[in-house]
Image: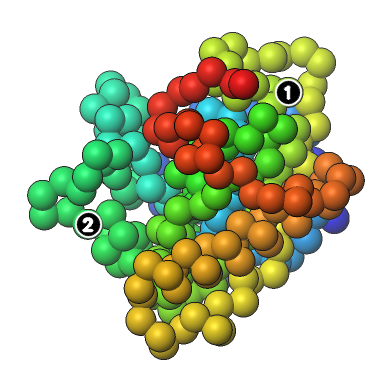
């Protein structure tokens, strides 16, 4: 188990922009929370992989980025295209190689999965949130996943690593607008073994196969979260369509 130890030595892939981002973000993130990382050795130290976390707070990507940096890897994200037009933030996103994704479709001439695939073949770690947005589950369990993470891993033939974290909601609750500064929180992160996709490789990428493989990924993430919460896995994965919920944008919790 890795707790609030010193950051891992910066790897060669950590280009200057990431050093700058770390300089700006690491101190406040360490001030906000202590990070307890379970099975950190399961994060590949070299080579490409898809990293798939659960998602229930707007600050999750920063938390996951902090954890990956602590373990010696630089994260690349599929980020909402609108963020790339935000002053300063957009510059950081572009120069650090993050990947814009249009919620309503793909920008002409740009396929986000193809771009992520290229990054993967360059040996980078790509973070893809399989839920696509903050979970709609009232108890913050992972909801039904989308197929992007699985499709990426199968196309590029690279490991798909599940991860779960718990405690971020105490720093910034789901759809919260304020960060809780005191007292210092504890965020626990557990990294899983690569998802077993052997039953899905080499069989094409039809929707039925991708949906089945995504269900396996979500089950792995949910099991990791159940271990962190010391609670049983829910009997059924939350499906927004069964509760008349949109999977894009904010919503009122029932």
Residue 25 against residue 252 in the figure, above or below = below
Where is mark 1, residue-wise? 170
Give the x, y percent position of residue 113: 31, 60
In the current view of this chain or complex, which residue is farthest to the right? 230
Along the line of sight, the residue nearer the viewer: 139 or 6: 139
Element on which disc 1 rests: helix
Q: Quadrant of the N terminus?
A: bottom right
Q: Which residue is mark 2?
A: 111
How far is mark 2 from mark 1, CA to CA? Answer: 36 Å
Residue depicted at x 52% and y 68%: 212
Q: Position of residue 33 (x, y in %)?
A: 74, 29
Residue 239 sits in quarter: top right
Looking at the image, which is closer to me, 204 or 83?
204
Q: Which quadrant holds the C terminus?
A: top right
Tell me if I can see residue 12 in this picture: no
Residue at horizontal 68 percent and vertical 61 percent from the top: 220
- Residue 112 appears in which quarter of the rendering? bottom left
Mark 2 surroundings: few (<14), some (14-19) or many (≥20) residues within 10 A: some
220 vs 232: above or below: below
**Residue drawn at x 49%, y 22% as measured from the top left:** 251
User: Does residue 136 appear left or right of residue 82 in this picture?
Assistant: right
Can residue 77 be spotted in the picture?
yes
Depth check, front residue: 120 or 229: 229
Residues 24 and 109: in front is 109
Mark 1 neighbour class, 10 Å CA radius: few under 14, some 14 to 19, many 20 or more: some
Relative side of 151 to 135, left or right: left
The colour style of the image is rainbow
* Rendered location of residue 186, percent (x, y): 80, 32
Label 2 or label 1, whichever comes before in sequence order: 2
- Measured as percent of width and height from the top left, residue 26 is found at 60, 33
Secondary element at tag 2: loop
């Amino acid at each position: 188990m890795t707790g609030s130890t010193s950051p891992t030595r910066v790897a060669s892939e950590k280009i200057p922009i990431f050093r700058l981002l770390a300089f700006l973000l690491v101190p406040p993130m360490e001030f906000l929370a202590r990070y307890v990382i379970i099975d950190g050795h399961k994060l590949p130290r070299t080579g490409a992989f898809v990293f798939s976390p659960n998602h229930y707070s707007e600050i999750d990507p920063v938390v996951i980025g902090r954890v990956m940096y602590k373990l010696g890897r630089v994260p690349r994200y599929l980020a909402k295209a609108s963020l790339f037009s935000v002053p300063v933030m957009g510059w950081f996103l572009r120069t650090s190689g993050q990947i814009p994704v249009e919620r309503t479709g793909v920008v002409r001439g740009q396929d986000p999965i193809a771009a992520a695939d290229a990054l993967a073949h360059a040996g980078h770690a790509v973070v893809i949130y399989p839920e696509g947005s903050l979970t709609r589950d009232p108890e913050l369990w992972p909801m039904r996943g989308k197929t992007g993470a699985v499709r990426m891993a199968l196309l590029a033939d690279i490991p798909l690593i599940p991860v779960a974290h718990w405690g971020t909601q105490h720093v910034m609750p789901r759809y919260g607008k304020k960060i809780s500064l005191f007292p210092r929180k504890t965020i626990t992160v557990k990294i899983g073994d690569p998802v077993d996709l052997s039953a899905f490789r080499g069989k094409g990428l039809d929707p039925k196969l991708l949906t089945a493989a995504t269900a396996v990924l979500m089950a792995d993430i949910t099991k990791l979260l159940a271990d962190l919460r010391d609670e049983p896995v829910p009997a059924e994965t939350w499906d927004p369509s069964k509760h008349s919920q949109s999977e894009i944008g904010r919503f009122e919790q029932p």
